[in-house]
Amino acid sequence: MTQRNGIRGTRDRHLYSEASGVSEQVNGMEPEKVQEISDCEMEEGGQAGDSMAVTGAVTAPDGGWGWVVLAATILVLALTLGFPSCVGIYYTDLQNEFHASNSETSWVPSIMTSVLHAGGPFCSVLVERLGCRTTVMLGGVLSGLGMAASSFTQSIAQLYVTAGVITGLGFCFSFQPAVTILGHYFVRRRVFANAMSSTGAVLLNCCVCGAVMRPLQPSRRRGQPLMTHSLPSPEEQNVKKEKGRMRTIQSCVVAFLSKHMAFDQLCNNQRYCMYSIGITWMMLGFVVCLVFLVPYATANGMEQGQAALLLSILGIVNIVVRPPIGLIFNMSWFKGRHVYVFASAVLVSGLSNSICCLGPSFTVLLSFVMVFGLSMSVAGSLMFTVLMDIVDMSRFPSALGLLSIMESITLLIGPPLAGTLVDRTGDYFYVFIACSAVVASSAIFLMASFYWLDKKDRKSKQGQISTLPDPARPAVDGAPGCHYSSVPTEGDQDKASANRAESSSSI
């Protein structure tokens, strides 16, 4: 029985029904492109404001309307991630306007970036209730209002609330749903899509971008529903009524944390745990150089326009480099190696901060911008791809939410600590040295930990193969869902078949 899924470039698919036990299969479907979309991410009929829970299997188009979603995500990430990086241009102006110290001024981009990441769980709730499209539009409105209110502030403390909290929260509501839905639209081309989306180039335009992010639709089934929900028995209802109010609140809190923050992944998935620790430590110094680059240049006699040009060049490097990087690292050879490429890029990015210590001349800082921009392009292209590789896509929103909470702490304290260092020493030299040490050490930690986990997995699999009593029995992974796997690419099935044949012959 053939059904259409309503998405351009529709492909036949394989639907499974647990309730009815009915299995429908047609030719031409790629198994790795079928994704289970949670109820909170689907809207019946694809109409705005008409949200309805639906359960079913959908096909990732890897193109079609996905290109429109990709274009919208590019602009969303340009506004949400690019804007905090440009605050350094106005750093000196903010100091002079509010008569603030380096430490006080640095709290503005720090709070904005921290709230952008810390709002992940709240964003996850909104996505569940409203869908990705409406949440992105809401974020555009909120960030626009925050920036408009910032123009009326009379003190640096008021700017913390308007530009920091309100605008940062709006950025969060636009940024995270855009990244999440892009992962559903692209599977084979996921690395390229993530690279393009992170090119990073008003704020109310996020509403327009959110409008085109219609959710993927499952095929509509005529007849019996796929799942039936039975009402609880009277005995169960009585038991629930006897529970105390505190126990009910505790259960709700635990359920919320379990659903919207992937603590289970943090405890059971060693790769996710190591990745989260490495990223959290990296963020302590990764964006600090962008905040203090322009103040460092202007404090040493460079014109502000020329100093701001450095950030423009950095943006151009990102826009030009990331698309070809996405194509290169989408090749099958990099399957399973994305995390090492990412860590290597982070290492180069960290070491590049030491270039600024050579002097504040335009030539030296331009060299830093070029090296940092290239390495940042690779790291930015693969950051979300690696996360999608090490956790199941159904757990990605909650995994991203927990990771965002963790890194928001270091993002919050990083710039103020650097500002305090400048106030006490009177020199930006120590800031770039500290950033170089922090970021480079996080890269070394990621490479070492993932190499250790890969070596551990290889030994485990070899031991399982050698102790198998039945040649027909495949090797079973002792910790499902906790191992690193990259995005499926074309030709993987042929390689897998050849590997199975070779393994059987060797046994």
Image (spheres, rainbow, N blue to C red):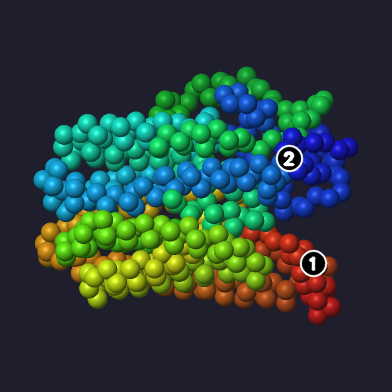
Residue drawn at point x = 37 percent, y = 33 percent: 144
Residue drawn at point x = 57 percent, y = 24 percent: 49
The type of residue carrying mark 1 is Asp
Per the rendering, the mark at residue 8 is 2
One can see residue 435 in this view: yes
145 sits to left or right of 97: right
In this orientation, which residue lies closer to the viewer: 390 or 338?
338
Q: Quadrant of the N terminus?
A: top right
Which residue is tagged 1? 494
Residue drawn at point x = 71 percent, y = 50 percent: 33
| Image location (x, y in percent) of residue 482 | 58, 59
The answer to whether 207 is drawn above or below residue 261 in the figure is above
Per the rendering, the mark at residue 480 is none
The type of residue carrying mark 2 is Arg
In this orientation, which residue lies closer to the viewer: 105 or 234?
105
Cα–Cα gap, marks 2 and 1 = 28 Å
Q: Label 1 neighbourhood size at 10 Å, few (<14), some (14-19), many (20+)?
A: few
